[in-house]
Amino acid sequence: MALRHAVLAALLDGELSGYQLTKAFDLGVANFWHAQPQQLYAELTRLEKDGLIAGRAVVQETRPTKRLFQVTDAGLAELEEFTAASAKPSFIRDDLLVKVQAADHVDTEALIARLTERAAFAQAKIDLFGKLLRGMRGARTEEEFLRHGHRIGPYLTCLRGLAFEQGNRDWCERVVTVLRERR
């Protein structure tokens, strides 16, 4: 997957400025694709040059003129082609796993501290995903939203992010328990 596809997908809900796009990435897209703001602005320029998005200037009285971007028909076609292509499996690349691999030969207390930090980080993300999911579905139950909601893609990716972080938290807590019991 290229950053271009993540940006196109983020713009599917309507026009966004570069600033709004960075916020959208922080809240939703970042659970499956991380990008720095500078990368996003550069990608917007490339996508517009390639005709996959269209930008327009919006004059503001008390602020600088901003640009809003939306996906073009060519951009939708690019997403269609990307969606139809085979997806490569993802792989875990995590320095914490390297540290745990070395658990028999390193300071267990330091390792427990890192695992506890990671579990706390995962819990914070779990709380954020829960808030995002509740906000997306409103007063509807999850089943009602998934059956009748207007746009379920962002919801489904947040569900994946939630499951990922729950797995991280649970694994970290399990490893801490094992390490403590082995002392």
Image (cartoon, rainbow, N blue to C red):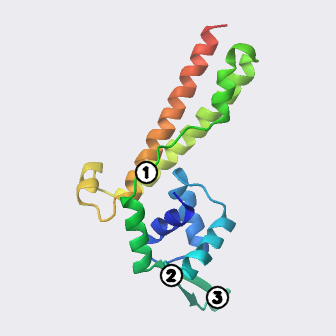
- In percent of width and height, residue 171 lies at 53, 27
Residue identified by numbered label 3: 65
Please name the residue shown 58% across and 21% down the image: 175
In the picture, measured across the screen, residue 112 lies left or right of residue 14, that is right
Instruction: Name the quadrant containing residue 66.
Output: bottom right
Camera-side residue of 179 and 41: 41
- In percent of width and height, residue 56 lies at 54, 88
Amino acid of disc 2: Gly
Q: Find numbered disc 1 in the image and state the secondary structure of the residue it sits on.
A: loop
- N-terminal of the pair, mark 3 or mark 2, is 2
Give the CA separation, mark 2 to mark 1.
Answer: 24 Å
Amino acid of disc 3: Thr
Amino acid of disc 1: Ala
Of marks 1 and 3, the one in the foreground = 1
- In percent of width and height, residue 28 lies at 50, 57
Give the CA separation, mark 3 to mark 2.
Answer: 22 Å
Residues packed near mark 2 inside 10 Å, few (<14), some (14 to 19) or many (20 plus) = some
Q: Find numbered disc 2 in the image and state the secondary structure of the residue it sits on.
A: loop
Q: Find numbered disc 3 in the image and state the secondary structure of the residue it sits on.
A: loop
Residue identified by numbered label 2: 51
Image height of 73 relative to 143, above or below: below
- N-terminal of the pair, mark 2 or mark 1, is 2
Residues packed near mark 1 inside 10 Å, few (<14), some (14 to 19) or many (20 plus) = few
Camera-side residue of 89 and 157: 89
Please name the residue shown 62% across and 77% down the image: 45
Residue identified by numbered label 1: 87
Image height of 100 relative to 47, above or below: above
